[in-house]
Amino acid sequence: MPAGTVVPRRRSRLFSLLLVGVVSVVTVLSSWQLLGKSASLSGRGLRLGAWPGGPEGKFLPLRSQVNYFDPSNLRIGHAWDIHRFGRRTAENGPFILAGVEVPDCSNIGVVAHSDGDVIFHSVTDAILGSIGLRDIGQYYPDTDSEWKGQSSDKFLHDTLKRASDMGFRVVSVDVTLVLERPKVGKIMPAVVQGLRQAIGDHRASVNVKARTSEKLNAAGEGKSVEAHAVVLLYKDK
């Protein structure tokens, strides 16, 4: 159409209506395509159309999903744990991470009242904090002989039950180990699996990574091992 040509008002209205109609159809088709793709995702319970606690396998209208997802149901917890290394003795047990004994360090023991598993300890403490409870020492004190030499997965399982009784489940766990030696890279898959099994929920995202502290502080001098844990819980009951 030549520049400057005046388009009749009726034709202009028809063109506008046609344009609006095309945009509406494209929007609807895109929404259906998104819903169709989301239906095929397992997504650990966090997929579109099946928010945690919603009817499993059933779609919710987009507006309903926005209203259904309540951020107040989320809880975040963080914790840090540290244990000194010492000579392996009857008192200082083996070096254990998420229930996995670290190989090639038979002379290294962990100074602890329980088995000194810093991963289980930090995750347990983080969960306690996320649901508004006190620290791990309040529930499993090192002054109580019941916990002497106790496997630390006991603490984690008890704490998970506390959370479950309050309606919470674990959505995500991320742990950072800090140690100079021994090197643990080769056993990290087993460590992650050990933590995943202890959490006991296949929907949960579980991760463990390790780093040094650049030879600074006790961990950097090879005198201790530290663990930082961050957890995300969701209330779906």
Image: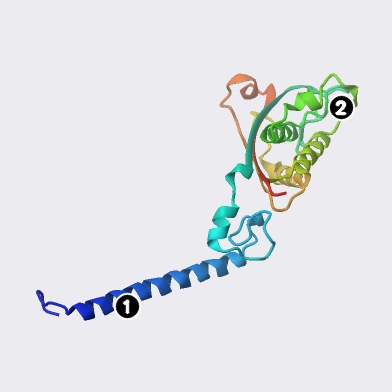
Q: Nearer the viewer, residue 126 or 87?
A: 126
Front-most of residues 93 and 231: 231
Which is nearer the N-term, disc 2 or disc 1? 1
Q: Residue at x 88, y 23 (%)?
A: 90
The residue closer to the viewer here, 184 or 27, is 27
**Image point (75%, 27%), residue name:** 136
Q: Residue at x 9, y 74 (%)?
A: 4
Estimate the x, y position of residue 17 in percent, counting from the top left. 31, 76
Packing grade of label 2 (10 A; few <14, some 14-19, many >=20) is some
Please rate how many residues cluster around mark 1, counting C-alpha atoms within 10 Å: few if below 14, some from 14 to 19, many from 20: few
Q: Is 134 drawn above or below residue 24 in the view shown?
A: above
Which amino acid type is shown beneath numbered disc 1? Leu
Residue designated by label 1:
18
Q: Is residue 153 left or right of residue 122?
A: right
Q: Amino acid at mark 2?
A: Trp
Q: Are marks 2 and 1 in contact (CB under 8 Å)?
A: no
Residue 42 drawn at (x, y percent)? 65, 61
Q: CA distance from mark 2 to mark 1?
A: 74 Å
- The disc placed on residue 147 is 2
Q: Is residue 175 visible?
A: no
- On screen, residue 18 above or below 59: below
Q: Name the residue rendered at 90%, 22% in the picture.
A: 145
